[in-house]
Amino acid sequence: MEKINIICVDDQREVLSAVLQDLSPLAAFFNIEDCESAIEALEVMDDLDAEGEYIALVISDHVMPEKTGVEFLTEISQERRFHQTKKILLTGQATHQDTIAAINRARVESYFEKPWKSEELLNMATTLITEYIFDSGIEYEPFQAILDQTVVLQRLR
């Protein structure tokens, strides 16, 4: 079975813990990495990629020291290795311009304002991971129990 990863990035540990808790139903099928900065996340992503693992989803805060979430997500969207990786921007402080930049430059698939609804974040993560699996040509059957069945049916048609 392929090793598929989710990367969660936020400089506030309590927010990061909340994201991890919300995504916990996915942990039986996917590896979930938590990082407290964009720099740390890039290092983890490089290591996972070097080991031949997949990075299906990155969930990032926007306002962080050293590099904003939009800058970070833009950087990974321009990396050929992570071209298929899905991205969620999670923030309470982004401006209208930040949001536009996230969509246009970082190709963010989804945007959540803090505080978010746990079920909505989990559902979106599940949908995006399902899309990633099909987009990347990964065998979906081992993950079928956790995938978004609507997306699976659409992709199999």
Image (cartoon, rainbow, N blue to C red):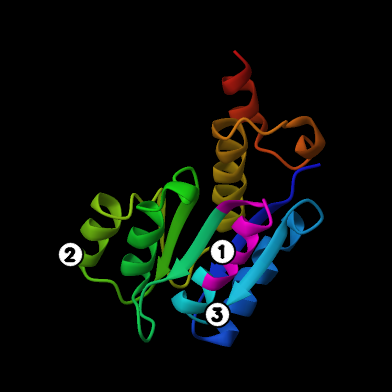
Q: Which residue is drawn at 58% across and 86% down?
A: 13
Give the magenta part as a residue range: 43-56
How far across and how far down the image is residue 1, in percent?
81, 41
Task: Report the residue that reaches farthest toward the top.
Answer: 157
How far across and how far down the image is residue 117, in percent?
54, 63
- How far, Cα to Cα, is label 2 from label 3? 23 Å
Q: Name the residue under label 1.
A: 45
Q: Mark 3 points at which residue?
A: 15
User: Residue 150 occupies which quadrant of the picture?
Assistant: top right
- In the picture, measured across the screen, residue 102 lies left or right of residue 26, that is left
Task: Report the residue that reaches farthest toward the left.
Answer: 97
- Magenta includes 128? no
Q: How crowded is mark 2: few (under 14 residues within 10 Å), some or many (20 or more)?
A: few
Q: Residues within 10 Å of mark 3 (few under 14, many from 20)?
A: some
Q: Residue at x 59, y 13 (%)?
A: 157
User: Which of 96 and 4 lies nearest the eye of the viewer?
Assistant: 4
Q: Residue at x 41, y 58 (%)?
A: 76
- How far, Cα to Cα, is label 1 from label 2? 27 Å
- In the picture, measured across the screen, residue 33 lies left or right of residue 90, that is right
What numbered label is drawn on residue 97?
2
